[in-house]
Image: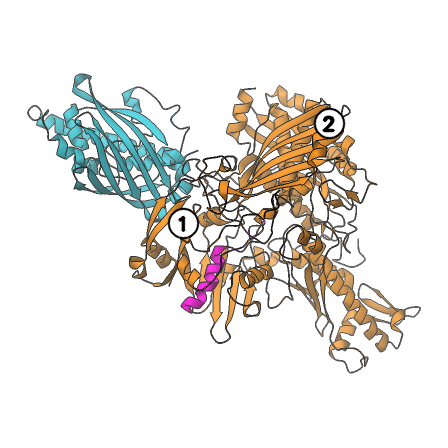
Chain colours: A cyan, B orange
Amino acid sequence: MEMQGEELINAPREKVWEALNDPEILKQAIPGCEEVIKDGDTAFSAKVKVKVGPVKATFNGAVTLSNIDAPNGYTITGEGKGGAAGFGKGGADVSLEEAPNGATLLKYDVNASVGGKMAQIGSRLIDSTAKKLAGEFFAKFNELVSDSAAAEAPAEAAETATETVAAETAAPTEPALAAPAAEEPKAEEAPAPSASWMRPTVLIPVALAAAAILYMLTKGGN
Amino acid sequence: MSAVENGIGASVTRKEDQRFITGNGNYLDDINKAGQAYGHFLRSPYAHAKIKNIDLTAARAAPGVIDIFVGADMAADEVGGLICGWGISSKDGSPHVAPPHPCLAMGSVKHVGDQVAFVVAESVQEAKDAAELIEVDYEELPSVTDVRKAGVAGAAQVHDEAPGNQCYDWEIGDKEAVDAAFANAHHVTKMDLINNRLAPNPMEPRAALGEYDRGTGEYTLYTTSQNPHVARLILSAFVNIAPEHKLRVIAPDVGGGFGSKIFVYAEETTTIWASKKVGRPIKWTADRSEAFMTDAHGRDHATHAEMAFDADGHILGFRVATKANMGAYLSTFASAVPTYLYATLLNGQYKMPCIYAEVQALFTNTTPVDAYRGAGRPEATYVVERMMERAARDMNMDPTDLRMKNFIAPDAYPYETPVIMTYDSGDYPQTLNLAKNMISYDGFQARKAESASRGKLRGIGSAAYIEACGIAPSAAVGSLGAGVGLWESAEVRFNPTGSVTVFTGSHSHGQGHETTFAQLIADKLGVPFDNVEVVHGDTTKVPFGMGTYGSRSLAVGGSAIVKAADKIVEKAKKIAAHLMEASADDIEHAHGVFSVAGTDKQLTIGEIAFAAYVPHNYPEDLEPGLAENAFYDPLNFTFPAGTHIAEVEIDPATGVVEVVDWAAADDFGNVINPMIVEGQVHGGVAQGIGQALLEGVVYDDDSGQLLTGSYMDYCMPRADDLPNFKVEATNTPCPSNPLGVKGCGEAGAIAAPAALMNAITDALGKEIDMPATPEKVWRAAQSA
C-alpha cells in the first residue's frame, strides 16, 4: 500500500531533523515502543508493542536509512517480525521543509505491506488503529520537539550533528500491520496541516516502525 | 404416506438432536486419551517463498516440547505426499499436472498457511510458544492469486512442474456444431461472470487425534471426516501411513462439512504419522484462523459464456470458457469439480442442440479449492441461469417464458444431453409454475410500483436449476477418471431381542441419517423407530463406505440399507415358513409381519429374530442369526431439479439488499422425511444467499496475503439476512434407485445465487458480480 501525508511540527527544521534521528525521542514518541537501538550509522533496531483489534504482538524490527540529506530528508526502509502475529515491511521517503513562523513541514510517502495474521485478522481495524497510532505519535513528537526547541533556543540550532543523528531515526521498524487499503486515502487527503495528522498516516519517518505497522494495517483494509 | 408409524414420509423429529442440543454430542475435541500430547503447525506467513533454512534449536529447548517435525522427517519415513483422486486429461490428451503436495513444506511454501513445521508439546500453549521460536529463513517470491492473471505471460510461477500455472486445459462438447449454430443465430447473449471464492465454515473446525498402539501395530485416527473409509484408503494406499487393516479411522459426531471434510489434508495425516514417532497420542484442533487458511475453499471461477438463439427464442447453441482456480495444490477431488461436476450440467433444464465448454484449471498461491456444497453444479447453474435471464431481458421476453419455451418436455425422458448426462426424470414446467404461484409472480409489477413509491428498487429473479446427485455409478465415474468406485454399503443387524443396528457407509455430519435411516427400517421391517440404532463413521464397525457428499447418502447409502433389508426379509421368510410349517413361497410380508397366505397365522419380525438367535426350532439348511450386508452401486446419477424465485427490495440510498420473498419449488423425487428435507433446503438457500450477498475470500493482489481471515472480514449470512422461505415440492420419482429418491442436500446452494443475482440485477437494471455487497449495489444504484 502507498500513503502520503504531511505534518506541521512546531520547531525549526534542524531541530526536527535532530529529533528524527534521536533514538530517545523516537522511543518516547512511538506508541508502544520499548526500545530503540542504534546498530550503526544507518541502521536501527527496535521493539514495539502493537495491538490491532484482537491481534497483540511485540514486533522486532530492523530499519536502515538511505538517501540521507540532512536536514532535508531521508529514505527509511525496514522490516518487522511479530511472531505469530505476522510481519510487516516497507519504507518511507521523508522530507522536511521550512514553514512560516519557524515551523517545519514534514512530508512522508510510505509504501508498506503486512503479512500473516495481521493481514488476515487486522485488516478491518487497520484504518482506525493507524489513525490512532499516528495521532499519538505526532502529538508526542510535536510536544517533545517543541519543548526541546523552546529550551535550547538559539545557539545550536543549525549545526547539529546531523549525520550521527540521522542514523538513529530509523529505530522502530515495525511494519507489521498494514494491509492493502487502496481505497483509504480518498477522502482523507485534507491539505490542512492540522487535519493531516488525524489521517491514517501511519508512517512517519520517524516511526517507521510504528508507521509501518499502521500501514500495513491500512493497506489491508478493504 | 406409510401405514407404519414413523415410516417413510413422516416428519419425524431428529433423534440425534437430543444429544446435540443438550451438549452431549461427542465431537472430536471432546475426545481425550491418556498421555495425550498436542500438536501445532507453524504456517507460512508468505504467499510464496523459498525456505532457505529452518532452525529448530531454540524451539526444541522450549518448555514442554516433545518433538518437532519438518518435511524432511516425513520424507525420510517415506510417507508420501497428498494425492488427487480424479484424473483429468487436457485437450491434447496429456494428464493433468499434479505437482508434489507434501504435508510439511519441502523447501518452499506456496500459500499463506502452508504447513512448515509440526510442534508436539505437552500443551497447546507450549506448542504454540515453541513454534514462535522456530527460525525460518524465507526468501519471498512473487505470487499470483487471481485466476484471471495466473495464466498470463509473466505471472508468478507456483510450481516448476506446471508451466504457465496450468493444471489442465479440458474441453467437452462439439465445438464445430456450436460454431455453426452461432453462425445461424438470430440473437447472441454474452456475459462475463465471476463465481466468488468461498470459505466453507463448518461450525466445527477440522481436528485430528492420532494414536499408535505399539502392542498391535495399529493406528487409530479420530478425524473430522465425511468419509472415513476413503480417508483410510488414501492414507494407506497412497500416503503410506499403514496398511488398511492396521489403520482405523473414526469420524465421530462431526459439526458440518459442506464438502470441506471430504478431503485428506496435511494436518490429519501429519498427526497420525507423528503419533508413532513420539509414542503418544497427539491431538490437533484447528482454530478458526487455520480453518480460513487451510480448509479447501469453494468455487472461484471466471467464465465467459455465449448463448445463441433463433428468432423465436429457442436455444441454438451454448459456448462456455471457464478459468478455474485450483489453489496452490491439487486437493483430493479438485480436478473433477470444474469439469465433470460442472460442465456436464451446462445443459440446464433445456433442449440445447449443442454445447461446447472449455475449462482451464490454474494453480495460484492460494488455499486449494475443491468441492463445496454443490461442487461444480452451482457454478453451472449460475452460468446457465444468469444467461437465460439476461437473454430474456435482451430479447424483451419474460425470463420465465423463455425458460418455458426451452424446457425439456416432461415426456422426453430419458433425455440425453450434449454433455454426456442422461436425465432420467423430471417435470420442469411443473416446478416453474409452482414457484411462480408461490411468489405471486404475476403481481410483481404492482409490488414494484409500490416499492418505487417509497423510493425503493424492487427486483425479481428466477433460477431453474438441475444437479446430478446420488454420486454416482462407479462405471460412469471410473470412465471419467475417478480413482474410486462410488457405491455404498450397509449392514442391517437384528439383535436377539428384536432391536436393530444399522451400519452405514454414509456419514452424518448434520444430515440427520440416524433419523432418516431408522425410518427406512421402521417402514421396511416394522421395527419401532426407537428400536433402530444407526452406526456410522468408524471403519472398524462399518463394513465399508464411500461417505457423504454429492447428495448421495439416501439415494446410494439408503438404497444399500434397503437392499440389506430385502435380504433380511428373504431370510426371515424361510425362518417364518419353518416356524409356521408352511412353504416359504406362501409367506407374505408387510412392514415386519410375516403371514401364511390365506390363513390367520403370522409372526412378527421380532419373533423371527429371536428364533434366529435362539434356534431351538430352526430350519436345518439355514444359518442362525439375522444380519445382512449389502453393497449398492446406482444405475445413474439422480437429477433433482426445480425453480427458485427470489424477490428483493433495494434501498438505493444505502445499497442494502433486502431479500423480501423466496419461493423454492423442488423435485427431489420421493421424500422420506419432509421436515429434514425442508431444513436442507433452508440451509442450502441460506448458504447460496451468503454467496450472493455477503461472502467472498479476498487475497491481496500484490502480496498474496489472505485478507479475509476472520469473521470480521468474511461475512456469513445471519437469520436477519434471510426471508421466510416458501418451500414446496413436486415428485417425479427417480427410476434409478429402489427408493425413488433424488437427494436434496445441495439444491438450495445451487439455485440460490443465480436466482438472487437475477433479482438484484433486475432491480438495478445493470450487471454486478457476487457478492452484491451494499457498497457494490450502492455504486451501481448511484450510477444508474
Q: CA distance from mark 1 to mark 2?
A: 50 Å
Say which mark, if any, is on residue B108: 1
Q: Chain of mark 2?
A: B
Q: Chain of mark 1?
A: B
In this rendered view, identify the residue nearer to me: B567 or B143. B143
Q: Position of residue B150 (x, y in %)?
A: 49, 38
Q: Is residue B338 above or below residue B622?
A: above
Q: Residue at x 61, y 35 (%)?
A: B321
What are the residue bounds of the magenta stretch? B254-282
- In the rendered image, the residue lying farthest to the bottom is B616
Q: In this view of the protein, can residue B721 be seen by the observer?
A: no
Disc 2 marks a residue whose amino acid type is Phe
In this rendered view, identify the residue nearer to me: B631 or B153. B153
State the residue position of label 2: B309
Q: Residue at x 93, y 68 (%)?
A: B598
Mark 1–mark 2 CB contact (< 8 Å): no
Left-right relation of B725 to B325:
right
In this rendered view, identify the residue nearer to me: B127 or A145. B127
Specify whether residue B268 is painted magenta. yes
Counting other residues with Cα less than 10 Å from the Cα at mark 2, is it few (<14), some (14-19), or many (20 or more)?
many
- Location of residue B357 by image quarter: top right
Disc 1 marks a residue whose amino acid type is Ser
- Location of residue B125 by image quarter: bottom left
